[in-house]
Amino acid sequence: MKTVAIISRKGGAGKTTLTVHLAVAACIDGKETAIIDLDPQASAAGWGDSRKQETPAVVSAQAARLPKVLEAAVNNGADLAIIDTAPHSETAALAAIRAADLILIPCRPAILDLRAIGDTIDLVNLASKTAIVVLNAVPPRGSLADEAVEAIAPLGVSIAPIRIGQRAAFVHSLTAGQTAQEYEPEGKAAEEIQQVYKWMCKQLIM
Ligand SMILES: Nc1ncnc2c1ncn2[C@@H]1O[C@H](COP(=O)(O)OP(=O)(O)OP(=O)(O)O)[C@@H](O)[C@H]1O
Ligand SMILES: [Mg+2]
């Protein structure tokens, strides 16, 4: 089983959105997938409750239980576990980082998010791991994303080649217990997630 941690110490960066979308992309690809929600606010778990589909499996857990929960996922035949984390719990983020084969940091191309990203990278460095930034909610026009790439470059962390746009389908789909791929399969949001998913599989060699 491969494990992906989605972390960002900045609230609202898109951790839960990225978690559930990548998990559904993996399910569509025929992978047994589990979401492990370490956020006490349980947004991903709540989304899971509101779904009609049985997959992906969504488990709400505390950081101290993470190794046991991952072990259970392996025993249940999971191919992929994606861990969603809270912005303000260093302990939970560190547990997720330590357990992960791949660490993704969603980041909006906005000044406050870019200022905060150093804190997230510090956590990753503390665990002697490397992470990749995924630019999220990129506006359709303007140079914000390019400016973000320039601002992130000196921090010594790589940036995923695919950017996720600011799109209504990412918001509306979740309200219906779905993701963009299910809500608007032919839409641009679904297309972007598919590309990020394929890129993620390459990173994980799966
Ligand atoms: N690409 C996007 N396009 C449009 N809206 C987005 C996008 N990504 C996230 N959002 C919206 O931004 C808000 C925050 O996203 P999300 O809940 O995924 O962030 P988070 O990092 O999990 O937040 P928290 O730190 O509170 O857990 C949500 O309302 C979500 O629908
Ligand atoms: Mg969240």
Image (cartoon, helix red, strand yellow):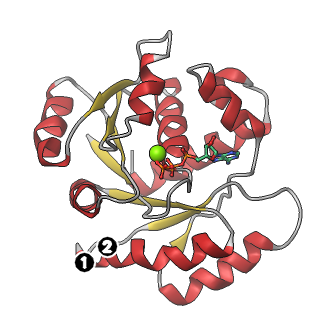
Give residue 24's position: percent from left, percent from top. Answer: 51, 29
Q: Is residue 135 above or below residue 4?
A: below
Q: Does residue 55 appear in this view?
A: yes
Q: Which mark is residue 167?
A: none
- The verdict on label 2 being within 8 Å of ligand 1 is no
Q: How far is the residue under mark 1 from the one under mark 2?
A: 5 Å
Residue 151 placement: quadrant: bottom right
Q: Residue at the far right: name it.
A: 141
- The residue identified by callout 1 is 126
Q: Amino acid at mark 2?
A: Leu
Question: Residue at 74% across / 25% down in the picture?
Answer: 184
- The residue identified by callout 2 is 123
Give residue 90's position: percent from left, percent from top. Answer: 28, 64
Dots 1, 2 in contact, CB < 8 A:
yes
Q: Residue at the far top: name it.
A: 52
- Callout 2: SS: helix
Mark 2 surroundings within 10 Å by alpha-carbon count, few (fewer than 14), some (14 through 19), many (20 or more): some
- Callout 1: SS: helix
Question: Residue at 49% across / 63% down in the picture?
Answer: 10
Give residue 62's position: percent from left, percent from top. Answer: 20, 42
